[in-house]
Amino acid sequence: MSQDNADSDTILEAALQRANVAPPTALRDCAEWLDLTQPASRPGDIGAAAHALADRHVEAAAHLSMAELIESLGDMPRDPDLARALNEGVPAELIEQGLCHPAGFPGLAGRLRDKAGRGAGHVCRIADADWLEDARADAETLLSLGGQLLLAPGDLPPAETLTSLIDVAGFVGPDGLEGERLADVAGALRGRLGEDGLVLVTGLVGAVLALGEDISTDKGCALAEAILALLASETRGGAFRKAQADRLALAPRRASPRKGPGLAILPLAQQAAFISPASDGLSPLGALVEDGPDGTVPARVLRLALGRRDPDALAALEARISAGEALSEAGEISTDRLRARGFTLEAIARIQRALGEGLPLNAAFSRWVLGDEIISGDLRLAPEGFDSDGHALLSAIGFSRRDIETAERAVEGWAERRARQALQEAGINAAPSTGDMLGLAERLAPYLSLAPIARLAPPEALANAAAAQAAGIGLLISPGSRAEPARLHERMSRIHALAEEILEQEDDMPAPPATPTAAAEAPQPGPAGETRRTRLPDRRKGYIQKSTVGGHKVYLHTGEFDDGSLGEIFIDMHKEGAAFRSLMNNFAISVSLGLQYGVPLDEYVDAFVYTRFEPAGEVTGNDRIGRATSILDYIFRELAVSYLGREDLAELGDATHDGLGRGLGDAIEKAGANNFTEEAAQLISRGFSRGQLPDNIVILDKRRPSPDENADEDASTPGEAIAQALDDGMPDYLGEPCGECGSFTLHASGEDGSLACDTCGARQTAN
């Protein structure tokens, strides 16, 4: 390897580490719309494309529905399950396909899901902007279905072209553009991509903003042009004139044509996972704020822009965002009205901190933010009803649904609006017009190897298509995501709410009294195909485990069904970042829903134990687990030990406070000592006691089984039945205390007249 190649590899490796460039890949991975493009030969083809896309949406919905039907049957449904599904409306042909498929029902469901997601996108390429006027209704229909329209001059590059992304905004620092480093990286890409490759330039609008300008001004456009000229001089030896070099505080470069990759500005894929550029192609800056370790913070480009124009404005913006002042714009749900309804200053401060960390309004007013002492003490409400539903708490203290929805909209995007306002006050236009974008594209076109293509939304794109075509600029008209009509969304919301109410009413209806014959003949539903939710009681048992995993505090809350089985979990991370803490909270909710819909805890345990990610390491505060490879590993090992008796997942011995264990294998029989009975489940938490009765609790049988219990159990006459019932209910304990423990639970045991104690298990010979 030559010295030049070694230096180029070092330069590229450093740029990859800083996420300034993406590793070379096929162009289709950066711009997926290339593979979806179908040319139209006349305006009528736009309508045909819309009809074809509508048909594919119907087919995708049908395939997805059938996949969900099959998945509801389980992995290996039995014949009774299939018969029940047939009676409930599952087509017989679908069941036959599942029985015949080589991978069974799961394989058929996966195949249907693949077909549902295949071919959903469509890009119709048109040759003339006038077609949009001739077939405007068809174009709007295609866009409403999630399709796209492409108006591009010249030939498009092959989808397999070797391509690398470069984010020029990443080369701007507090001291300005790092021009020499940018030139070195461009030169290294020339050697890596070759003359047939392509460099996709991204972050250009963000770079101009980070330098304290915007593309709506001539100075901002000149900066963008100078940056692109610098790249062109390194890739293909174009001239870097003195006026351009002066704008970037660099030395000019003479033209020296060479073979190298071309430059292009194209819309990126919606799910590009290589780098996260400050801006996409010619589009304006996306988000001005981002999630940081301690909540929402201004984005890097915004900090650089305000730092150049108005450092005091940057400090004020950071203070307002961290203080969580979103309540000041929440309409009726203001701090004054909250104070009038019983909220203390401490409670409002907690809400503001949560909003400042990026939590939505619903989570900021939940139980896990406010705390039980505020909800029960200050607001006089039961905390159990507001575990994850802050909307219900706001309704309970008198706010209307309209008030809550208005506040939700005001809080959502509050930091973004404040950031744009700060830029506007500093004299920077963060939202340039479509005309500004097209004007910039026209100035950059001479430095590109193919015509620039800008992504625009339908209203602006349809109005500016003719002007873009006249300037030799391409347009990708994209609605973003498929938007459902407001009326359809509202009606489906009502239908879902009504379905939930019907299910709740059915759950609350008392079961009709069944005759013994009917009870014996009633079919017992199997686990496969059972999808109804079993709700937890309003007042439930459970436990709270506080532990530290790798130095991070973790609070695990559990809720149990009446029989002691696990029904819900909540995970609270103390002083974690908003994103990670919210992710863990929502993960716990999804696990809880799965448990209530019948997913066995064993499945979760097998899926998540020994997963590896930070935080991890030593565990303190838990007497059975000493180390964990991740938070999820710790959580599900703890649940497995406590609710499933999985001692293989525990690390420490099962010892009591006195070091004597639980008495297994001592005088009491093992089965009796470790029997967590139904009566015990009604009194204490199964998880807290880890499925074993504590040392100081003894559950006595209601009656001793008689030797002839399996004899004739049914009395022949009503009188004999009453007498037998009285005999069964009479205790047969002796009226003498046990000589070992003093309990009055002695009874005769065996034919030799020996006595046994039900409390301590001691045996003694009768006097």
Image (cartoon, rainbow, N blue to C red):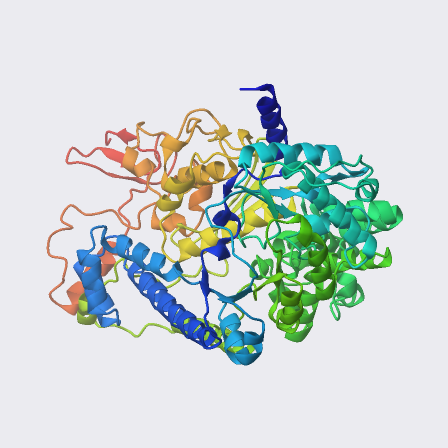
Which of the pair 318/281 is nearer the observer? Answer: 281
The residue located at (20%, 68%) in the rendering is: 92
Task: Using residue 52 as the reference point, say whether residue 139 is left or right of it.
Answer: right
Image coordinates for residue 429, horizontal then vertical, percent: 79, 59
Percent across and percent down for residue 39 are: 46, 65
Percent position of residue 698, x then y:
38, 41
In this rendered view, identify the residue nearer to me: 345 or 45. 45
Left or right of 3 on screen, residue 111: left
Q: Residue at x 52, y 56 (%)?
A: 155
Asked if residue 621 is positioned above or below residue 534 in the image, the reply reads: above
Would residue 561 be seen by someone viewing this image from the given angle? Answer: no
Residue at 59% x, 35% y is 190
- Which picture quadrant has residue 151? bottom right
Number of labelled discs? 0
Residue 590 rendering spot, x and y as whole percentages: 47, 54
Along the horizontal axis of the image, is 4 left or right of 482?
Answer: right
**Residue in view at x 32 percent, y 61 percent:** 67
Q: Quadrant of the C terminus?
A: top left
- Residue 672 visible here: yes
The picture quadrant where one finds residue 462 is: bottom right
Viewer-closest of 696 and 766: 696
